[in-house]
Image (tube, rainbow, N blue to C red):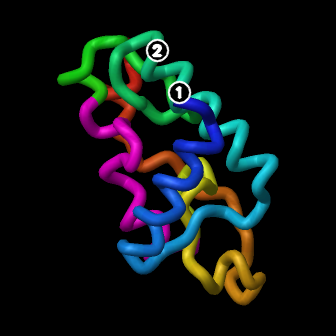
């Protein structure tokens, strides 16, 4: 799959969820490439913004879209990676701030 194809799929998916992809397409395409690289590397699309273990059951919480996406968007307007965002975030109505890591440290220790 090419990054552009994944972009189209995830953009439609995001809209079906009432959210959007970040409107910075160049930034998003980097994340698309990271997702596809991780899929090639591990067999699943782990979050490219986090370090995956390569063991899918251990990484289940960070397979995109990660389980932290919705609470991040609800609280900050974007997910940790800034891939998925609210429409208000894209429109600049929600301040763009660093989203703190919600993944428990014990899951990050490989």
Q: How far apart are marks 1 and 2 (CA)?
A: 6 Å
Residue 2 sits inside the magenta stretch: no
Q: Quadrant of residue 3?
A: top right
Q: Which of 96 and 84 is in front in this view?
A: 84
Q: Main secondary structure of the magenta part?
A: helix
- Left or right of 89 in this view: 79: left
Q: What stretch is highlighted in magenta?
A: 60-77
Residue drawn 39% across the image and 49% down it: 65
Residue 104: % across, % down: 34, 38
Residue drawn 78% across the image and 59% down it: 24
- Left or right of 110 in this view: 73: right
Residue drawn 42% across the image and 30% down it: 46
Q: Name the residue under label 1.
A: 36
Give me the disc on residue 92: none
Tell me if residue 73 comes above or below residue 91 in the rendering. Answer: above
Give me the disc on residue 40: 2
CB atoms of marks 1 and 2 within 8 Å: yes
């Amino acid at each position: 799959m090419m990054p552009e194809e994944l972009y189209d799929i995830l953009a439609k998916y995001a809209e079906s969820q009432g959210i959007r992809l970040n409107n910075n397409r160049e930034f998003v395409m980097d994340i698309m490439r990271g997702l596809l690289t991780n899929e090639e590397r591990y067999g699943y699309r782990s979050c490219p913004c986090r370090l995956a273990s390569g063991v899918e059951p251990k990484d289940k919480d960070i397979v995109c879209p990660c389980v932290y996406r919705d609470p991040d968007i609800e609280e900050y307007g974007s997910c940790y990676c800034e891939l998925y965002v609210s429409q208000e975030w894209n429109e600049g109505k929600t301040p763009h701030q660093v989203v703190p890591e919600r993944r428990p440290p014990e899951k990050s220790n490989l």
